[in-house]
Amino acid sequence: MKKLWSLFVVLALLGPAATSQNTVPEVSKAPLQAMQALASWEGKWMVQMRYSPDNGATWQDLPPAEHDFKFREKGLILREEPLEVNPNTFQSATYYSYDQYRKTYRIAVMDDTWGIMDIYEGNITDDKLVLTNMKSGTFFPIGNGILRGFKLMIDLAGDTQRSFVIHKTDDNGKTWQPNFNITYTKQ
């Protein structure tokens, strides 16, 4: 028992020294570097969502919500989730990642209305992360046999305020119309 206790003491003393070295596995380096482009999102943000039922002609404000962005899974996943449950509005939890083999960012969105895990893929263009769910086919049935897809345009610039614009398509990406306009304000 005394030898086992001595081993625990040695491991406890060596543990912090071992983790202070660069212990990132080689396979994790590329996605960790890609995820740094999203690092400034970490923290709490006040979210004001606006919805357009008529392709951008008019807009309706939804109740504001506070969201928290945190890195998880050793920094390989960024999670966004509302801090309070609001039964009177649409809410979702979102997971951001980078697929180094296909060279694409991927987002999984799980909502509390349709219950669909929606998968988006895309890349960074001009300080915006632009993704669609066209490849995954995780469309939303809206009636009359119409399946709705979305394009997300997420602003990566701005220290205290950012935009997140969502366009919709009901014709498999041939045309796009404004659907949501979201403002994030850093808390």
Image (cartoon, rainbow, N blue to C red):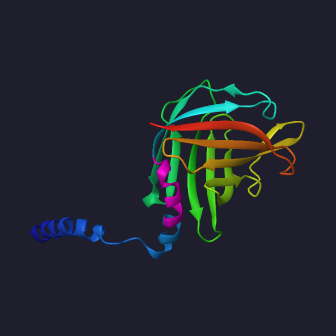
Asked if the stretch drawn in magenta spans residue 134, the answer is no
Q: On the rendered image, what quadrant is the C terminus found in?
A: top left
Residue 35, position as x, y percentages in the image: 52, 60
Measuring 87% from the left and 47% from the top, which residue is drawn there?
171
Q: On the rendered image, what quadrant is the N terminus found in?
A: bottom left
Q: Is residue 83 above or below residue 5?
A: above
Measuring 58% from the left and 46% from the top, which residue is drawn there?
94
Outermost residue toward the right in this view: 144
Outermost residue toward the bottom in this view: 26
Residue 82 versus residue 39: which sits nearer the camera? Answer: 39
Secondary structure mostly seen in magenta is: helix
Asked if the stretch drawn in magenta spans residue 36, the answer is yes
Magenta extent = 33-42
Q: How many marks can you see?
A: 0
Residue 3, position as x, y percentages in the image: 12, 71
Residue 89, position as x, y percentages in the image: 62, 27
Q: Is residue 27 left or right of residue 56?
A: left
Residue 143, position as x, y percentages in the image: 85, 35
Measuring 51% from the left and 48% from the top, which residue is drawn there?
79
Q: Is residue 76 above or below residue 41?
A: below
